[in-house]
Image (spheres, rainbow, N blue to C red):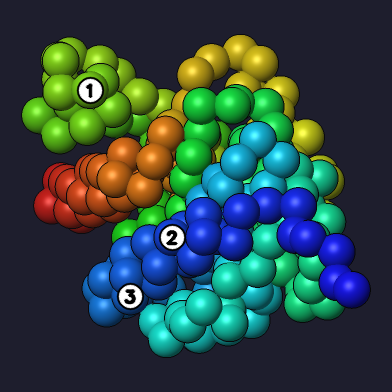
């Protein structure tokens, strides 16, 4: 007799469907080139639905979504989760409110990360779209989007993210030459943050080009 799954399979199916439909849209914008990027959704207090490593994110099916626990260990599967699983699970583990983490490799995100790696952050101020981070209450906020050095050592990267999360609230960060992580309480909020970061980074890059 097979043992029952430790998570609700219907909940996994709903999370997977949500990831598939949203990621197809993000991929159609060119934000997930060459199998890059990874995506996850919290199933419950202990389990996360996340993309399998190396899959074409523009063509995801249910078979490309698996379950890991909050330490990033595969649950009831022998598939290999995203190489960057730890960057997802560290957020779910630390913040019970976080329900969705989205990581993309758009052109704007990658160029901005290269340009601002030296400064360590991209400063965002003066934009109406900053309301995307304040629950539409005010645009009068300033955000420094951190830029972390890229590494294949996820424990090093996760430790740097954790140290910054100790000091300030964050809705996303860049990795140098790599891409953007953004998150939210659910898919809609995470997407709003991701799209706002993408738009604002595009503005910063255009202004810098026009002023030079
Ligand atoms: C070819 S992309 C390099 C790895 C990466 O940065 C990424 O986002 C995708 O890795 P995954 O293991 O999640 O497919
Ligand atoms: Zn990546």
Task: Name which residue lies at 40% across and 68% down.
Answer: 17
Relative horizontal placement of residue 57, taking residue 23 as reference (left or right): right
Task: Name which residue lies at 22% across and 32% down.
Answer: 132
> Which of the two discs, 2 and 3, labels the residue nearer the N terminus?
2
Q: Is residue 21 visible?
A: yes
Q: CA distance from mark 2 to mark 3?
A: 16 Å
Task: Name which residue lies at 51% across and 55% down.
Answer: 11
The front one of 146 and 77 is 77
Rendered view: 79 above or below 178: below
Q: Position of residue 117 (x, y in %)?
A: 54, 45
Is disc 2 surrounded by few (<14), some (14 to 19) or many (20+) residues within 10 Å?
some
Q: Which residue is mark 2?
A: 14
- The numbered mark at residue 24 is 3
Quarter-wise, where is residue 30 in the image?
bottom left
- The numbered mark at residue 10 is none
Q: Which residue is mark 1?
A: 135
The front one of 177 and 85 is 85
Q: Position of residue 68 (x, y in %)?
A: 73, 56
> Which of the two discs, 3 and 1, labels the residue nearer the N terminus?
3
SS at mark 1? loop
Q: Quadrant of the N terminus?
A: bottom right
């Amino acid at each position: 007799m097979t043992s029952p799954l430790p998570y609700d399979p219907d909940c996994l199916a709903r999370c997977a469907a949500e990831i598939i439909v949203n990621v197809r849209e993000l991929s159609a914008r060119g934000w997930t080139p060459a199998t890059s990027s990874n995506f996850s959704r919290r199933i419950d207090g202990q389990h996360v639905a996340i993309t399998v490593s190396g899959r074409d994110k523009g063509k995801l099916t249910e078979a490309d979504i698996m379950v890991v626990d909050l330490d990033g260990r595969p649950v009831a599967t022998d598939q290999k989760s995203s190489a960057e699983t730890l960057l997802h699970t560290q957020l779910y583990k630390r913040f019970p409110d976080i329900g969705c983490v989205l990581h993309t490799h758009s052109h704007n995100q990658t160029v901005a990360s290269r340009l601002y790696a030296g400064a360590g952050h991209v400063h965002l101020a003066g934009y109406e779209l900053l309301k995307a981070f304040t629950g539409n209450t005010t645009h009068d906020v300033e955000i420094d989007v951190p830029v972390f050095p890229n590494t294949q050592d996820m424990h090093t990267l996760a430790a740097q993210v954790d140290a910054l999360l100790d000091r300030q609230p964050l809705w996303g960060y860049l990795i140098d030459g790599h891409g953007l992580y953004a998150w939210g309480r659910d898919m809609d909020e995470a997407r709003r943050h991701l799209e706002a970061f993408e738009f604002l980074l595009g503005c910063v890059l255009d202004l810098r080009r026009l002023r030079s």
